[in-house]
Image (cartoon, coloured by chain):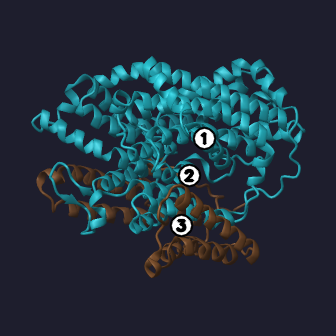
Amino acid sequence: MIEPLISATSSLLSGASPLYLMLGIIVGLIFGAIPGLGGTTAIALLIPLTYGMESDEAIILIGGVMGAVMFGGSISAILLNTPGVAPNAATAFDGYPLAKQGKAGLAIGAAATASAVGGLLGVVILVMVLPIAKLIVLSFGPPEFFLLALLGLCSIAVSTGGLLLRGLIAGGIGFGLALVGFDDVSGGVRFTGGIEYLWDGVPLVPMLIGLFAIAEMIKLSTEGGSVATDTSGVRITRVMDGVWATFRNWPTVLRGSTIGVFIGCVPGVGGTIASFLSYSVTAQVSKDSETFGKGNIKGVIAPEAANNAKDGGALIPTLAFGVPGSAEMAVFLGVLVLHGLDPGPMLLLEHESTIFTLILALAASTVIASLIGLAIARQLVLITLVNVNILIPVVVSVGLVGAYALHNAIGDVIMAALFGVVGYLMMRFDYPRITVVIALVLGELAERSFHQSMAISDGQLAVFFTRQVSLILVLMVVFALCWPVFRYIYTHRRGLDAKS
Amino acid sequence: MRNLRELRMDMQHDSGRRMVSSAVVLLITSVFIMSAYRYDARGAEFPLIIGWVTLMLCVVDLFASLPTQIGGWLSSILHKSRSTPDDKTPASGREAGGILWIGAMVALVWVFGFLIAIPIYSIAFMTLNGRRPLVSSTIAAGITTLFVYVVFEWLLRYELYRGLLFG
């Protein structure tokens, strides 16, 4: 572990890497602060900038974004009661009342410190878990790889806000898209409709830009207006009081971070649940629980610690098993693919130093983002005044140029726009986009592993049940699929009990 | 407060919306399966598994969207819409407008290339869609074009598409 760590440290400190880290942090803070954008859009738009970079530099840039987005969102949540990203909604419960009492600095100082400490704790736990994950991965064969892709898809579909069925259907469509183009197994091309452009498959980067950046802009254009109308009342003082308050409330930080890491580990559950759970648990165990919602500093510390710690947790399934825990992680896997790093369990075995580079970048960015955020919080809030009618042309233009830049192909621009419309319609009709991306990214691995499994078992499907690890994975898939039924029975019974 | 009749009408509208979207996805999946049968056995094996499983899920989804007792039961287990009765559905005209603006941008890029399309699209969008003053729209469009030029052509040395007319 020491050797990859040294190599990762030198990557992070050499050449233009520190500049890329700073760029990622600033982009992350800005995209985090503006509601409706968030980390996924930021990463999708930054992908084109990484084309000419070394893989380590690209990962440092993205790591910078990941570490900074949450804190960016908490600034607008505290000062304007407008969470930048969904998980920051819990921060606004007590952050905004504090700001109204003239204690915005206290809240922002506490949020910054809790974010940094939570992020670092998440990374430490990730580093501790990786060697164990490596041992597990070594026992995997083709059937396990196939089942892992299936499990990733099912667990994400289950956790997409009650949209299991449509999550799975979207996953099926994603697998279908992954099958477009040249097929290694049969040696021919499939599902191209005679279009030569599709022989290399559905291009991942234009699809990501379309599904996340362009689709969000279409949605914003239907809503109109600007995010905030007045920031004149924003005053930021007593920041250091917030920093000390965080250290004084160390059990809250520790509890929030632990919740964040564990929730982050579960694919698809995400930061919103982590921060709300951390908030509610803290409110329940606190002696002054009646002051929550009225400006209790622990109500800021708990969700912020969980928010940032969950990134470390979410990287465990993403890096160890190639199963992304969130849309942001799915787009991050797209970056890995672009730079020749195949997502999946072998990533951990073959590119350990790259993984450590990301971990270090994430750790550094959580701390630096908090420092920068504290310094420019007042200015950052002004960004939310930008009218969406200015924001949309900027994001659409940069997005489409980015889609074009990789292959200098106008077809990629059309593809990005097409997926933008598809992404918008998916949002509109309750089809989760994340399962499409996960299926597209893991589709090739799933098909290859499926054929290899069939080859080693002479076409017997029993190969998926007779091996110990595969059997466990099959049971996990079945459990994931049955989970909504269990939940329905449980809530139905509770309803009957309450009536009686 | 919304009355019961309005709420019921919204639920029927939601059910109809879901049925149409389910039917469209069912159709796409059926076309995918039919296409898969054209390939040899090895090339079609995995696509057919994916296709048939997805088709079955689409059928269940279609049943779940029906305004019947079984549809309601399936829906309560497998589909909890994220929208609440108080959520505003965007007007169809605004939605179509949002999509058309993207289509217009792509057409402009195709014909004139990025460096001409970006200012035209930005100014048109800000003034026509956003009702913003022409001067501030022109300044914002200029900054966006300059940003794209400096970052992509100058710093990253990509040659941006010049369009059918000037390429």
Chain letter for the cyan colouring in the rendering: A
Q: Which of the 4 image quadrants contains residue A413?
A: bottom left
Residue, disc 2: A41
Q: Nearer the viewer, mark 1 or mark 2?
A: 1
- The local secondary structure at tag 2 comes to helix
Q: Residue at x 28, y 22 (%)?
A: A139
Indicate the chain on which mark 3 is placed: B
Image coords of residue A262 (percent x, y): 53, 26
Can residue A427 be seen in this snapshot?
yes
Q: Seen from this angle, which residue lies furthest left?
A: A458
Image coords of residue A473 (percent x, y): 32, 30
Q: Amino acid at mark 1?
A: Leu
> Label 2 near label 1: C-beta < 8 Å?
no
Question: B131 or B77, which lies in front?
Answer: B131
Question: A147 or A440, which lies in front?
Answer: A440
Count of numbered circles in the view: 3
Residue, disc 1: A19
Position of A159 with respect to A240 (left or right) is: left
Distance, label 1 to label 2, CA atoms, is 21 Å
Distance, label 3 to label 2, CA atoms, is 31 Å
Indicate the chain on which mark 2 is placed: A
Distance, label 3 to label 1, CA atoms, is 52 Å
Q: Amino acid at mark 3?
A: His
Residue, disc 3: B13
Position of A375 with respect to B5 (left or right) is: right
Position of A319 with respect to B91 (left or right) is: left
Chain letter for the brown colouring in the rendering: B
